[in-house]
């Protein structure tokens, strides 16, 4: 399967498109039952007996169709949404419902939704833009569901693909577990640094060298700030966002700055201070270049 990020890029689905699709939910919300009912009538009119039998065998199928429509218009369009669509495709494969009928169903839903937009939105330019965004989203949904169906069919007849699929699922589960471990580790480290900061604040008044205590507390505060940023980045990554390597460089940069501030106050090993300044300069350039690259990306 192609990654969800690449699919979005190939279909040129932007965050603006996602917002436009989400903005349609209040308009279509009251028509969900009508859309599902029209879809099932269309399925029965195909007179494909094996499809009609499956429709009758699953009385809760209407609720599943409605659930998909709600997710379509509410999102969020992240990794969870991607895997939801894959499961939908695999379910169709297990029920032996050919991709052809999935495409027919999607065409029916598309026609109904386009009619609703034509009825509810008077502004022609706005309506055209909303239809364009919605069509992208529907095409992406059909693409993922159909691709998942085909892959599931191939897996059933190929031992190599079954092994590959198992390894991928295991690797994804392992990766998700390690991400959770990373978040927990970050929480523990952040709590430790917060404790160090309060310890430094207490030492400001406990020791005679107040300037040293202030600088030390400030350094701990900088590290605490960068750890919070690192945790926020990891949380965004778990939600399906991009992982920014610049945060890691920021951690190293702050650590060197803290060491330089403390060493300057001690007035010891002046040559080491020069090395720290050089390291900070290099890391600063690397940080700036990485941030620029991430912004362009």
Image (cartoon, rainbow, N blue to C red):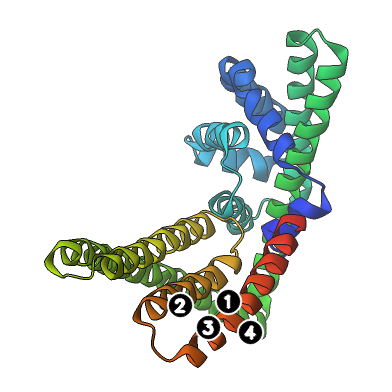
In-image side of 262 versus 150 (left or right): left
Return the residue at label 4: 159
The Cα–Cα distance between marks 3 and 4, rounded to whole angstroms, is 56 Å
Q: Quadrant of residue 45?
A: top right
Return the residue at label 3: 276
> Circle 1: is it few (<14), some (14-19), or many (20+) Cα within 10 Å?
some
Residue drawn 77% across and 9% down? 119
Q: Secondary structure at mark 1?
A: helix
Contact? badges 3 and 1 (CB < 8 Å): yes
Q: Nearer the viewer, mark 3 or mark 4?
A: 3
Q: Nearer the viewer, mark 1 or mark 2?
A: 2
The Cα–Cα distance between marks 3 and 1, rounded to whole angstroms, is 6 Å
Residue 260, numbered circle? 2
Q: Is residue 19 visible?
A: yes
Residue 280, numbered circle? 1
Q: Earlier in the sequence, mark 3 or mark 2?
A: 2
């Amino acid at each position: 399967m192609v990654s969800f990020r690449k699919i979005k890029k190939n279909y040129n689905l932007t965050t603006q498109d996602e917002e436009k699709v989400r903005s349609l939910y209040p308009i279509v919300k009251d028509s969900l039952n009508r859309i599902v009912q029209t879809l099932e009538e269309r399925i029965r009119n195909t007179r494909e007996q094996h499809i009609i039998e499956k429709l009758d065998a699953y009385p809760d199928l209407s609720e599943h169709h409605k659930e998909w429509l709600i997710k379509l218009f509410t999102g969020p369009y992240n990794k969870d949404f991607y895997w939801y669509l894959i499961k939908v495709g695999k379910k169709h494969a297990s029920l032996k419902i050919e991709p052809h009928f999935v495409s027919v169903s999607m065409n029916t839903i598309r026609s109904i939704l386009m009619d609703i937009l034509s009825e509810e939105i008077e502004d022609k330019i706005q309506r055209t833009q909303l239809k364009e965004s919605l069509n992208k989203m529907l095409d992406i949904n059909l693409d993922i569901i159909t691709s998942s169906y085909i892959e599931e069919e191939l897996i059933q007849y190929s031992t190599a693909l079954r092994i590959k699929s198992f390894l991928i699922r295991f690797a994804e589960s392992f990766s998700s577990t390690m991400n959770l471990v990373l978040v927990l580790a970050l929480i523990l480290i952040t709590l430790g640094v917060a404790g160090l900061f309060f310890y430094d604040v207490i030492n400001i008044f406990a020791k005679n060298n107040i300037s040293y205590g202030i600088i030390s507390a400030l350094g701990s505060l900088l590290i605490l700030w960068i750890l919070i940023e690192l945790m926020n980045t990891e949380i965004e990554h778990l939600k399906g966002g991009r992982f920014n390597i610049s945060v890691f460089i920021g951690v190293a940069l702050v650590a060197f700055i803290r060491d330089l501030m403390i060493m300057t106050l001690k007035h010891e090993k002046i040559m080491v201070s020069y090395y720290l300044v050089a390291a900070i300069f290099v890391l600063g350039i690397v940080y700036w270049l990485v941030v620029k690259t991430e912004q362009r990306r």
